[in-house]
């Protein structure tokens, strides 16, 4: 058994696709029209056939209060692995990304938390070797 898909709720699929591809560096994997929305996924360019992230429309009534509570408490919705958090932080800040937590090292892990512009906080993390 392996993880095939993970979802993240987004306010606007077009804005999310631009942020997750143009800014974060993922690649668009799947785009299937579904009426007013799309089945829209991105994947890591390092593993394009690996786990896909679904950019899921956030229109279900439970999504708003859930995401608002996470953001209010500073809790990231998910975490992405990077080779070097400090280096990725600097690259993303240069692209205008807003961080709610600057790089912080806690034992063997370094993390930072960013705003994905689509209603979510996202953690980036790297492990020390």
Image (cartoon, grey):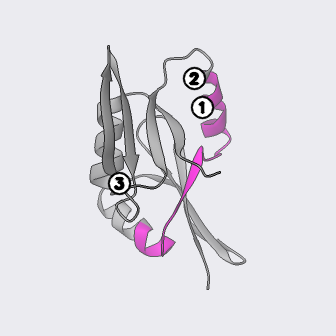
Q: Is residue 125 magenta?
A: no
Residue corresponding to mark 2: 64
- Residue sitting nearer the eye, 81 or 32: 32
Asked which secondary structure carries label 1, the reply is: helix
Q: Residues within 10 Å of mark 2 (few under 14, many from 20)?
A: some
Circle 2/circle 3 CB separation < 8 Å: no
What is the residue that sits farthest to the right in this orientation? 107
Q: Residues within 10 Å of mark 1 (few under 14, many from 20)?
A: many
Camera-side mark, 2 or 3: 3
Residue 115 shows in this picture: no
Circle 1/circle 2 CB separation < 8 Å: yes
Residue corresponding to mark 1: 67
Residue 13, image x, y percentages: 35, 31
Residue 127, image x, y percentages: 61, 75
Residue 81, image x, y percentages: 53, 64
| Lower position in the chain sequence, tag 2 or tag 3 | 3
Q: Residues within 10 Å of mark 3 (few under 14, many from 20)?
A: many
Gap between marks 3 and 1 measured at Cα: 22 Å
Residue found 30% across the figure and 34% down from its top: 31
Q: Is residue 75 magenta?
A: yes
Q: Which mark is residue 26?
A: 3
Q: Give the answer, above or below, for where 50 lies relative to 127.
A: above
- Residue interval drawn in magenta: 65-88
Residue found 59% across the figure and 43% down from its top: 77
Camera-side mark, 3 or 1: 3
Q: Quadrant of residue 63?
A: top right
């Amino acid at each position: 058994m392996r993880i095939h898909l993970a979802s993240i709720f987004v306010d606007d699929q077009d804005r999310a696709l631009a942020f997750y591809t143009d800014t974060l560096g993922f690649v668009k994997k799947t785009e299937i029209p579904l009426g007013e929305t799309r089945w829209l996924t991105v994947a890591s360019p390092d593993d394009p056939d690996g786990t896909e992230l679904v950019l899921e429309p956030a229109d279900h009534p439970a999504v708003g209060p859930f995401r608002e509570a996470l953001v209010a408490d500073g809790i990231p919705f998910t975490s992405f692995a990077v080779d070097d958090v400090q280096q990725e932080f600097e690259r993303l800040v240069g692209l205008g990304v807003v961080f709610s937590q600057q790089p912080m090292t806690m034992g063997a892990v370094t993390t930072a938390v960013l705003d994905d512009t689509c209603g979510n906080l996202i953690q980036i993390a790297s492990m020390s070797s």
